[in-house]
């Protein structure tokens, strides 16, 4: 049985800035999202990710390509049918997009207009949604009376009003502080788990991807440059842009900057070879450093170390200084590369 919920086939979007200039925001993107999955799309500003997510519910109509939901191509539907399908796709936004003149109740009820529901049915639906997002006591409050996290919870409740099976999140936590971000992410994971709702999450924060996603696509300049499971992206990414995002979710960058500005503080001396070593689920179980030191007769100092769990599997990063004669260090580095370990010798000119 095909478990594909969302499928984009060779989708592109071109905007005409004026009569003489066009901007290709999305370029021939194809991807599939499975039912009940949390799928992350990450990229820097201008990468095209927000345009891409709006192509899924046709808030932006693609210039070319197909958008399939449950195997049905939305681009072929007449407007009336498209509106019906779109009700099954909820969306939450970075800046909440709440109507300031309506109460929490009024905002949540707004998508239910024209549904031929009685007042009692609408009230009951709002009750259940307020309970789901933890805002039972805010029913009659206005957006101006709410915190950022509470506003986003209202946005989530409103997105769920029509009982969708897909939830699109466009930078849903970017305007929130870290604690509130954690609370909103926990709520989204709860919704995914309890409602089996498929979530597509757009972000520029790798920490959000790390916390939430089953699979990840990395966008740059309108194309997907890399896509894989969360663990594979973190443990064996292929692109420099991806590695830059990954480093923002750890303390590795701070350690490298300290090396550049004050290497002596970390015991690194001229002539030492400093390297970054990334371990995956297999190599974290091996005593690689001590084995190398004994085998090649060199000292290996650990400058920085971090082991964490990503996608339920262990992942480690070390910054080390190889100390000894040059030939032995070279042999040790080549030896590391034969194992299931990624090693990168850092630019010594940038450190010493």
Image (cartoon, rainbow, N blue to C red):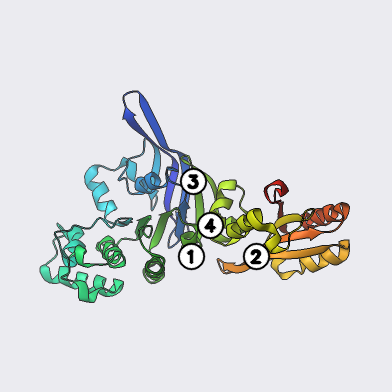
Which badge, 2 or 1, is on the more N-terminal residue? 1
Q: Position of residue 202 (x, y in %)?
A: 41, 53
Q: Residues within 10 Å of mark 1 (few under 14, many from 20)?
A: some
Task: Identify the residue shown where x is 39% and y is 71%.
Answer: 190
Q: Position of residue 97 (x, y in %)?
A: 25, 55
Which badge, 2 or 4, is on the more N-terminal residue? 4
Mark 3 vs mark 4: give the one in front: 4
Per the image, label 2 sits on a secondary structure element best described as strand
Q: Position of residue 34 (x, y in %)?
A: 46, 57
- In the drawing, what numbered circle is on residue 248? 4
Q: Position of residue 57 (x, y in %)?
A: 33, 49
Task: Identify the residue shown where x is 62% and y is 60%.
Answer: 255
Q: Nearer the viewer, residue 224 or 321?
A: 321
Mark 1 vs mark 4: give the one in front: 4
Task: Identify the residue shown where x is 36% and y is 35%.
Answer: 63
Q: Quadrant of residue 146?
A: bottom left
Which residue carries the number 1 mark?
211
Answer above or below: position of 10 versus 149: above
Q: Is residue 319 visible?
A: no
Q: Quadrant of residue 195?
A: bottom left
- In the drawing, what numbered circle is on residue 316? 2
- Marks 2/1: CA–CA distance: 17 Å
- In the drawing, what numbered circle is on residue 219? 3
Q: Nearer the viewer, residue 205 or 61?
A: 205
Which badge, 3 or 2, is on the more N-terminal residue? 3
The residue sitting at the left extreme is 119
- Marks 3/1: CA–CA distance: 19 Å
- Marks 3/2: CA–CA distance: 25 Å
């Amino acid at each position: 049985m095909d478990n594909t919920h969302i499928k984009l086939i060779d989708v592109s979007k071109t905007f005409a800035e004026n009569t003489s200039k066009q901007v290709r925001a999305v370029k021939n993107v194809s991807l599939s999202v499975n039912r009940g999955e949390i799928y992350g799309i990450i990229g820097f500003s201008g990468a095209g990710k927000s345009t891409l997510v709006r192509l899924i519910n046709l808030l932006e109509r693609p210039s070319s390509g197909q958008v399939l939901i449950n195997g049905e191509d939305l681009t072929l539907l007449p407007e009336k049918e498209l509106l019906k399908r779109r009700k099954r796709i909820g969306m939450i936004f970075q800046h909440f997009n709440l109507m300031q003149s309506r109460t929490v109740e009024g905002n949540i009820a707004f998508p239910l207009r024209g549904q031929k529901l009685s007042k009692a049915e609408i009230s009951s639906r709002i009750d259940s949604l307020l309970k789901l997002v933890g805002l039972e006591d805010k029913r009659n409050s206005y957006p101006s009376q709410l915190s950022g996290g509470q506003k986003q919870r209202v946005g989530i409740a409103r997105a769920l009003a029509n009982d969708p099976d897909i939830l699109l999140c466009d930078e849903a936590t970017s305007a929130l502080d870290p604690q509130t971000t954690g609370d909103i992410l926990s709520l989204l994971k709860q919704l995914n788990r309890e409602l089996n709702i498929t979530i597509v999450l757009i972000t520029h924060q790798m920490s959000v991807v790390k916390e939430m996603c089953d699979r990840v696509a990395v966008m740059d300049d309108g194309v997907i440059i890399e896509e894989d499971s969360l663990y594979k992206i973190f443990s064996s990414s292929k692109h420099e842009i991806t590695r830059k995002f990954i480093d923002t979710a750890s303390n590795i960058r701070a350690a490298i900057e300290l090396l550049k500005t004050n290497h002596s503080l970390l015991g690194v001396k001229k002539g030492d070879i400093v390297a970054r070593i990334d371990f995956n689920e297999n190599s974290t179980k091996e005593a690689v450093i001590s084995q190398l030191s004994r085998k090649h007769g060199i000292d290996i100092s650990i400058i920085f170390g971090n082991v964490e769990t990503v996608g339920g599997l262990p992942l480690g990063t070390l910054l080390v200084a190889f100390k000894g004669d040059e030939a032995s260090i070279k042999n040790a580095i080549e030896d590391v590369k034969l194992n299931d370990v990624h090693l990168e010798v850092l630019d010594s000119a940038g450190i010493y």
